[in-house]
Image (cartoon, helix red, strand yellow):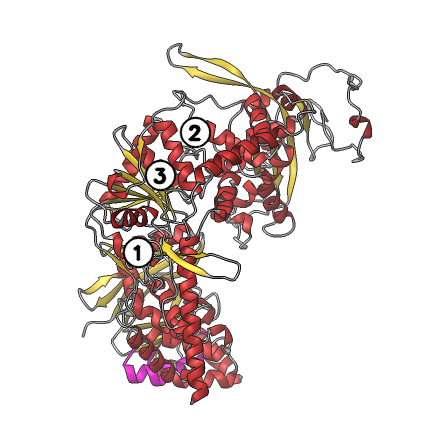
């Protein structure tokens, strides 16, 4: 496997991506345009996250890849294999042992540390996109901090449903400045966006990178009288008994019986090991 | 007394054609200025230059800001101008579709300006929206309906509520009664007059309809071919027009 | 006892093995060679090279074979491979008036210097299935030969330009931005728009062009000239101090001549749309020229009538089939975490609605 450079991308490209990452870290929540490359996996399947991971990886790293919180979902397996093949880095399923974690749609339950990087795969980086389709306009809105429309959307939710009807990709304001899409994580995960770890977001098709540096203030948008509520299904995990983790609902038979289990497979397995 | 708006030598050309030429005037707090003229006279160009929708070629538009006193709006940064546009200034379009969000509820339309300047209490925003719907004679029960379900007159009243909710100090109106039935026009004019007087608003109203300015405006400016050809108190200009063109304009109305 | 689903890794390996078997098909049927695809499916190869933005017929043929004939998948393979190629430099602009033309037609003049050359076209064939092709082993009768066209065939638009009848295009001396090396940025200038169109999906560009003909941004095009043939590719070698020929590529070029009624400041004049595509691909080249012309409304002082083809953000963001396919198909990836949170939201909203109804009934 010497036909490709370490972690697939050539060094020039990695430097270009690192410059975008550094700019993103310097301006938290700001979407930095970058010249996204065509990757050997389809757009929408994590090309942005893969490029960010490739630009961050060093041979000593230990990589964990999750999709929906699980290490063994097909897309997670495929991306992990890609880096095993092209970078020969060590991999792990343990959140605590990983130096870089690439994720799709979840933040690990176990708190992350200053020595770790969390890389998110982002499909649509623009939180205002479904209110305003033009990129020229949305960039102007960010530049001018013109975010009234975002709250109009939340107002309409409450007027119609009695609450803010956004369950995932719940918009946040970063360090009091930029409104940011935290990628389609469930809103349950939003409080974990204030973290000790460096968080990087890569959107390949949309050619954007953004970042939330460690200890950055991240506030989920809400109203004073309708505060943000990171709720989840009111059940404990049927496998490990955890009451503080995000749960998947699993249908177990034809009659529609169901059970709730941790979406974070490593968290669930560790708890069961500890209990045993 | 410091004028609220002090306009000096404002000109705008479209290629070789004159939009408006060397327009100067002052507007004092609490005053309503009417700008009349036929279509193509430059009155809409002037209004759009004043409101920052068009960039004039030369001139100054000095506004007495709340924080920093008189400042030339044309040299302000875009964020400052936008902030002005959603706080101290309001713009009522002739076509309510241009000034409303048609896919957002009436309450959301009124609440948008409040949220844009930082209101974050849903109950209070909704209360203010309901209050303003009442003031423009829209039943509170319609608060969650979209403007697309409203009549033309209601849409125009909603647009006015949406504009006035932040208590602006200067309102621009572009043919506010255009396109409405005569009976609806009368009711709307009456409403606008009541609001302007009660809130002590300063306003610039552009129209081709002399009945509108007779009812609303303290002073008049008559425009033709991009130039201001006559100014004065409304009654004075309408009852004793000096310029031949104004005489024609007034007499043509009286004939109707 | 429920055990969380495992084994994604083995499932993937097995799926790949099955795919390889299906790709080969019935072992009793001879395997296709790359050369066969390159020679006999040449137009598919051309499309993959054009949309893959990589001129290499053998690689394109390999991609088509590997993709089981799915051309968008083949384009994707080519693009992913292209990413890894180091860039040594840029060629000089190709000189299409020195093209060795296989085909060269003009719809705006009956005859012209160099003549109309029909070349290998489907245009006048009757679209009847030729069952003789089903019987293999028949070589076609040799086509009659003619003397080669002159070395230089002037462009039709040059004749119009001599009379000032067509708007001149300024020489762009600046190096254009490179779509594959810089993020897309708006407003996109014409070189950038043309790059996006030439690698855009043929179906998308065709439909956009067609929509302008049906009235969504109509611009009255004539095909001033369409030419297909080989051009030399040259590159300046700094160490040598002169340009050397690297090879040749087949290109299709289309220049449309469009009506322009003039404005207050400009007299009526024809304007241009431009299309240039790898390989023999005239449907794409003509489509590209129409869409190029539609997006030039602003520079030419025309009205934006709100037609999709006039909206450069719309066209450029949606023309790339590798982006479109990937994002479209990603919705089949697991989304159960998001779905779970939606499920909980809907349940809660329904429960609240039911509760308030019960309460109203009670009152």
Residue, far bottom: C363
Mark linked to residue C83: 2
Q: Is the residue marked by circle 3 packed among few (<14), some (14-19), or many (20+) residues within 10 Å? A: many
Q: Quadrant of residue A127?
A: bottom left
From the viewer's perspective, is the residue at label 3 or at label 1 nearer?
A: 1
Q: Mark 1 = which residue?
A: A245
Whether residue B165 is visible: yes
Q: Quadrant of residue C87?
A: top left
Mark linked to residue A34: 3
In percent of width and height, residue B100 lies at 43, 69
Q: Secondary structure at mark 1?
A: loop
| Chain of the residue on which disc 1 is drawn | A
Report if the CB atoms under discs 1 and 2 are less than 8 Å apart: no
In percent of width and height, residue C298 lies at 49, 47
Q: Secondary structure at mark 2?
A: helix
Closer to the N terminus: mark 3 or mark 1? 3
Where is C175 relative to B73, above or below? above
Mark linked to residue A263: none
Whether residue C298 is visible: no
* Residue at point 29%, 73% (across, down): B166
Camera-side residue of C100 and C302 = C100
In percent of width and height, residue A273 lies at 28, 46
Q: Is the residue marked by circle 2 packed among few (<14), some (14-19), or many (20+) residues within 10 Å? A: some
In percent of width and height, residue C355 lies at 42, 79
The range drawn in magenta is B193-220
Q: CA distance from mark 1 to mark 2?
A: 40 Å
Camera-side residue of A238 and A198 = A238
């Amino acid at each position: 496997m010497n036909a490709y450079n370490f972690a697939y991308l050539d060094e020039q490209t990695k430097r270009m991506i690192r410059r975008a990452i550094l700019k993103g870290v310097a301006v938290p929540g700001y979407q930095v345009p970058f010249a996204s490359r065509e990757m050997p996996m389809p757009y929408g399947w994590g090309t942005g996250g893969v490029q960010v991971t490739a630009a961050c990886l060093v041979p000593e790293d230990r990589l964990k890849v999750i999709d929906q919180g699980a290490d063994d979902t097909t897309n997670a397996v495929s991306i992990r294999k890609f880096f095993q093949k092209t970078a020969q880095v060590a991999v792990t399923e343990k959140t605590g042992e990983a130096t870089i974690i690439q994720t799709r749609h979840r933040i690990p339950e176990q708190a992350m540390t200053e020595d770790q990087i969390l890389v998110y795969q982002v499909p649509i980086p623009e939180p205002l996109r479904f209110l305003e389709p033009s990129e020229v306009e949305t960039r102007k809105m960010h530049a001018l901090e013109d975010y009234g429309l975002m709250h109009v959307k939340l107002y309409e939710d409450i007027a119609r449903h009695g609450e803010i009807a956004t369950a995932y990709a719940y918009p946040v304001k970063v360090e009091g400045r930029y409104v940011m899409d935290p990628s389609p994580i469930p809103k349950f995960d939003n409080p974990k966006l204030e973290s000790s770890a460096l968080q990087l977001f890569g959107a390949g098709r949309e050619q954007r990178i953004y970042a939330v540096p460690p200890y950055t203030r991240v506030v989920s948008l809400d109203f004073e009288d309708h505060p943000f509520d990171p709720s989840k299904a009111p059940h404990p995990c049927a496998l490990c008994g955890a009451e503080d983790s995000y749960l998947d609902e699993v249908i177990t038979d034809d009659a529609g019986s169901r059970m709730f289990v941790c979406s974070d497979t490593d968290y669930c397995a560790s708890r069961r090991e500890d209990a045993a | 007394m410091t004028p609220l708006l002090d306009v000096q030598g404002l000109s705008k050309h479209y290629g070789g054609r004159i939009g408006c030429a060397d327009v100067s005037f002052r507007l004092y707090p609490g005053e309503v200025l009417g700008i009349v003229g036929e279509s193509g006279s430059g009155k809409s160009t002037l209004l759009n230059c004043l409101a920052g929708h068009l960039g004039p070629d030369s001139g100054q538009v000095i506004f007495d800001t709340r924080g920093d006193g008189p400042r030339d709006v044309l040299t302000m940064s875009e964020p400052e101008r936008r902030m002005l546009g959603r706080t101290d200034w309001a713009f009522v379009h002739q076509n309510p579709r241009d000034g409303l969000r048609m896919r957002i509820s009436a309450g959301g339309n009124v609440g948008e300006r409040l949220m844009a300047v930082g209101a974050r209490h849903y109950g209070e925003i909704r209360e203010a929206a309901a209050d303003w719907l009442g003031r423009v004679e829209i039943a509170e029960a319609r608060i969650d309906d979209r403007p697309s379900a409203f009549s033309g007159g209601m849409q125009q009243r909603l647009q006015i509520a949406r504009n006035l909710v932040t208590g602006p100090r200067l309102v621009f109106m572009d043919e506010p009664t255009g396109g409405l039935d005569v009976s609806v026009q009368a009711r709307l004019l009456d409403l606008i007059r009541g609001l302007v007087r009660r809130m002590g608003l300063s306003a610039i109203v552009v129209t081709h309809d002399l009945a509108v300015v007779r009812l609303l405006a303290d002073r008049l400016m008559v425009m033709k071919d991009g130039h201001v050809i006559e100014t004065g108190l409304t009654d004075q200009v309408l009852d004793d027009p000096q310029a031949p063109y104004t005489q024609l304009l007034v007499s043509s109305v009286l004939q109707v | 006892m429920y055990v969380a689903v495992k084994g994604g890794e083995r499932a993937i390996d097995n799926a790949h093995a099955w795919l390889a078997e299906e790709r080969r098909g019935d072992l009793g049927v001879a395997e296709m060679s790359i050369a066969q695809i390159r020679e006999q499916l040449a137009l598919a190869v051309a499309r993959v090279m054009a949309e893959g933005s990589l001129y290499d017929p053998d690689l394109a043929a390999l991609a088509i074979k590997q993709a089981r004939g799915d051309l968008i998948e083949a384009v994707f393979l080519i693009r992913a491979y292209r990413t890894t190629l180091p860039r040594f430099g840029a060629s000089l602009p190709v000189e299409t008036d020195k093209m060795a033309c296989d085909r060269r037609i003009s719809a705006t003049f009956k005859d012209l210097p160099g003549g109309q050359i029909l070349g290998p076209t489907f245009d006048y064939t009757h679209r009847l299935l030729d069952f003789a092709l089903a019987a293999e082993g028949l070589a076609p009768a040799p086509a009659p030969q003619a003397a080669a066209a002159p070395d230089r065939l002037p462009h039709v638009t040059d004749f119009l330009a001599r009379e000032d009848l067509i708007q001149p295009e300024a020489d762009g001396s600046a190096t254009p931005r490179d779509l594959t090396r810089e993020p897309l940025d708006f407003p996109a200038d014409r070189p950038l728009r043309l790059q996006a169109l030439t690698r855009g999906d043929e179906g998308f560009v065709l439909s956009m062009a067609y929509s302008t003909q049906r009235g969504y941004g109509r611009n009255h095009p004539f095909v001033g000239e369409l030419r297909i043939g080989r051009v030399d590719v040259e590159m300046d070698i700094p160490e040598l101090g002169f340009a050397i020929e690297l090879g040749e590529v087949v290109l299709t070029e289309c220049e449309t001549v469009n009506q322009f009624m003039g404005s207050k400041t400009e007299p009526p004049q024809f304007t241009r749309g431009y299309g240039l595509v790898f390989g023999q691909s005239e449907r794409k080249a003509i489509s590209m020229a129409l869409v190029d012309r539609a997006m030039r409304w602003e520079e030419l002082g025309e009205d934006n009538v709100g037609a999709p083809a006039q909206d450069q953000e719309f066209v450029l963001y949606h023309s790339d089939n590798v982006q479109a396919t990937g994002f479209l198909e990603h919705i089949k990836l697991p989304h159960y975490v998001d779905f779970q949170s939606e499920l909980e939201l809907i349940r809660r909203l329904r429960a609240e609605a039911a509760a308030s109804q019960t309460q109203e009934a009670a009152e």
